[in-house]
Image (cartoon, rainbow, N blue to C red):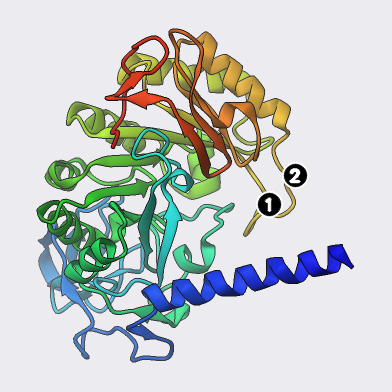
Amino acid sequence: MARKNRKYLILAMVVIALMVTWWELGSGFVQTGPEPTLENGFATEARFFETLEDGRVQCGICFRNCVIAPGERGFCQARENKDGVLYSLVYGLPSALQRDPIEKEPMFHVDPGSSIYCIGTASCNFRCRHCHNWHLSQLTIEEVGSYYQRTPEDLVREAKERGMPAISFTYNEPTILYEYIYDTARAAQEEGIRFIFHTNGSMNPEPLRELLPYVDAVTVDLKGFSDQFYREISQARLEPVLNTLEIIREEGVWLEIVNLVIPGYNDDPEEIRAMCRWIKEQLGPQTPLHFTRFTPAYRLTGVQPTPVETLEMAHRIAGEEGLEYVYIGNVPGHIHNSTFCPDCGETIIQRYHFSVYQVNIDDGECNNCGNEIPGIWP
């Protein structure tokens, strides 16, 4: 009977949480609203495109540099050429709005334990076979079929009203909704709200450098360390991602890296070692690196979850290569989900999965030995 009552209690807690989320964020939701077409005004002129002959345009927002004929869309399916002008079809139309712990990004060295306002739209410029958010990222906005209507100012206002210190664009690739994230980042900065985003690292250098002055922190997926992996798994390339990482570091924006370890695809020890060595040499030993556990999803359902031993091997290699802040993710309760001072070895942020239980940092320094801990602290 006690087990049965516990089951009902958990169910009730889930229902209440969903109701609170709907009450907080659900206003303005359009379940079966008009399709966001150019003709009905649900589109915004894009930035960083060039007009070519015969009405074609070339998009310059990401490494693909798509040449798009009139009436057609780019690879991402979120930018359309209308009479020689490129438009964003997802500006102000997020399909996901949610309060999440900042640790879920993952972002471990910024405002630990805080809840942030997370946003995503339809579409992406990668075709990752393992995407957990494929129901957003691999569909057009028409195929997703539902969305909210939120201006950048709406997002900032809602974050302030709900006491959320940061806004993050995270569930699909922010690059493809550049105009929306740029305007939101500027509006957030004006109101004292932090702006972060989680990206696949595909943005071209010019738009990236224009955006970064309004950004507090970035989480970048470094999906593997070979061009073959990027081609086979994501229909993408490695070099643009490495360029993005270097630009973020050059511009002085806080950076954390995620490497989802997929058995049989990117778990070769020597490749992991080469990646860690590159991170230390090009980005610095204090760059946080998250090795996260793969679980079957989308088109890689036949692959088994990452063995914890593989993640621990990757963690060990990163330490041998001199990286100071290395984490193991998607393994709740693992010791390397927490942050340790690289000087004295004491636990300075104790975590269980996405929950923070203890923070032993004052004014950016370890409480035990006074070592400076890099990050953005309250």
Q: Residue 175, position in %: x, y? A: 29, 54
Residue 371 image-quadrant placement: top left
Q: Which amino acid, by three-letter code, is at mark 1?
A: Pro
SS label for mark 1: loop
| Quadrant including the N terminus | bottom right
Query: Left or right of 264: which side holds 142?
Result: left
Q: Secondary structure at mark 2?
A: loop
Instruction: Quadrant for residue 280, please give it.
Output: top left
Q: Are marks 1 and 2 in contact (CB under 8 Å)?
A: yes
According to the picture, the residue beneath numbered tag 2 turns out to be 304
Front residue of 360/54: it is 360
Q: Residues within 10 Å of mark 2 (few under 14, many from 20)?
A: few
Classify the position of the C terminus by image quarter: top left
Q: Which residue is labeled 1 in the image?
A: 296
Residue 151 in the image, given as x and y percentages of width and height: 20, 72
Pick the front one: 186 or 230: 186
Q: Is residue 226 visible?
A: no
Q: Please name the residue shown 52% across and 17% down the image.
A: 318
Tell whether 179 sits left or right of 322.
left
Residue 141 versus residue 268 in the image, above or below: below
Mark toward the start of the polypeptide (1 vs 2): 1
